[in-house]
Image (cartoon, rainbow, N blue to C red):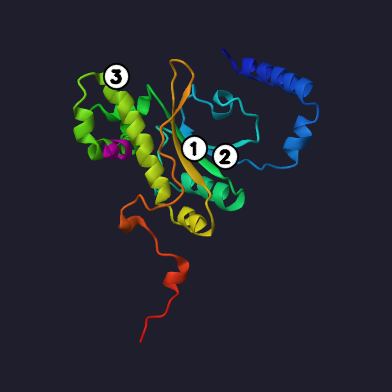
């Protein structure tokens, strides 16, 4: 594990040599442009790097990360990344991937103060409020935290489904698919939570935008 800045630079040179030995023209391909099929919305936790845990090469996954893999509709950074991925890169799959043992989830379960971070944790606490009865039924704190991680991913999949330009893309075809995954630090395995969606009909009607053709219809006389 890298301990100093110089370790990171040495690691970079070793990585370049290793990948050029395996794929001599790798960097020429990379320089030519990117056409990833996947957008990864993950946690900022340093132990959950998207390409490493999926054994994918650079250029295959477009990535956005924040504390507890949240989809907040006022987060212009996240929405810009999602917009570029969906509308420009035409990714076919969006993966929301959390992880068990998430510090953001554990902080949101507590009543501790974390300064400026408290403002972000409110969005996670909102998920707890929605699922309070189920989560409060757990006597074991570890099991409660793990289930909170899963429910949070489920809610972020829903939040992505509410994004207007994603719904516009669904009007045109089947993509993108949105998947909810969770990564285990304990064994390194990814679990598919089975919450894959590619339309908005699972949402309450108030979140379902009218199709553009419907908006342009003139009222009948």
Mark 2 vs 3: CB contact within 8 A: no
Q: Secondary structure at mark 3?
A: helix
Q: Is residue 188 left or right of residue 14?
A: left
Q: Is residue 162 above or below residue 64?
A: below
Provide the residue designation for mark 3. 142
Q: Which of pointers 2 and 3 lies earlier in the amino acid sequence?
A: 2
Q: Which of pointers 2 and 1 lies earlier in the amino acid sequence?
A: 2
Q: Residues within 10 Å of mark 2 (few under 14, many from 20)?
A: many
Q: Residue at x 50, y 45 (%)?
A: 177
Q: Dividing the picture into quarters, in which one does residue 56 lie? A: top right
Q: Quadrant of the C terminus?
A: bottom left
Q: Quadrant of the N terminus?
A: top right
Q: Dividing the picture into quarters, in which one does residue 130 lie? A: top left
Q: Is residue 79 left or right of residue 90?
A: left
Answer whether residue 114 is visible to the viewer in this image: no
Residue farthest along the bottom direction in this orientation: 221
Q: Which residues are magenta?
A: 123-127
């Amino acid at each position: 594990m890298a301990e100093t800045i110089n370790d990171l630079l040495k690691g970079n040179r070793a990585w370049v040599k290793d990948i050029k030995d395996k794929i001599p023209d790798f960097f020429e391909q990379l320089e030519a442009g990117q056409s990833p099929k996947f957008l990864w919305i993950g946690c900022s936790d340093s132990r959950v790097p998207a390409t490493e845990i999926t054994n994918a090469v650079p250029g295959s996954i477009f990535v956005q990360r924040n504390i507890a893999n949240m989809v907040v509709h006022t987060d212009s950074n996240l929405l810009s990344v999602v917009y570029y991925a969906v509308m420009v890169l035409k990714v076919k799959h969006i993966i929301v991937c959390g992880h068990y043992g998430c510090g953001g989830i554990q902080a949101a379960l507590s009543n501790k103060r974390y300064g400026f971070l408290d403002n972000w944790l409110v969005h996670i606490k909102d998920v707890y409020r929605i699922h309070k009865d189920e989560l409060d039924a757990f006597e074991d704190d570890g099991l409660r935290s793990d289930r909170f991680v899963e429910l949070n991913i489920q809610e972020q999949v829903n939040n992505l489904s509410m994004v207007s330009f994603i719904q516009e893309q669904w009007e045109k075809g089947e993509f993108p698919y949105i998947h909810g995954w969770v990564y285990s630090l304990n064994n390194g395995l990814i679990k598919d939570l089975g919450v894959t969606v590619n339309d908005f009909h699972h949402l309450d009607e108030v979140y379902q935008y009218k199709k553009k053709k419907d908006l342009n219809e003139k009222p009948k006389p």
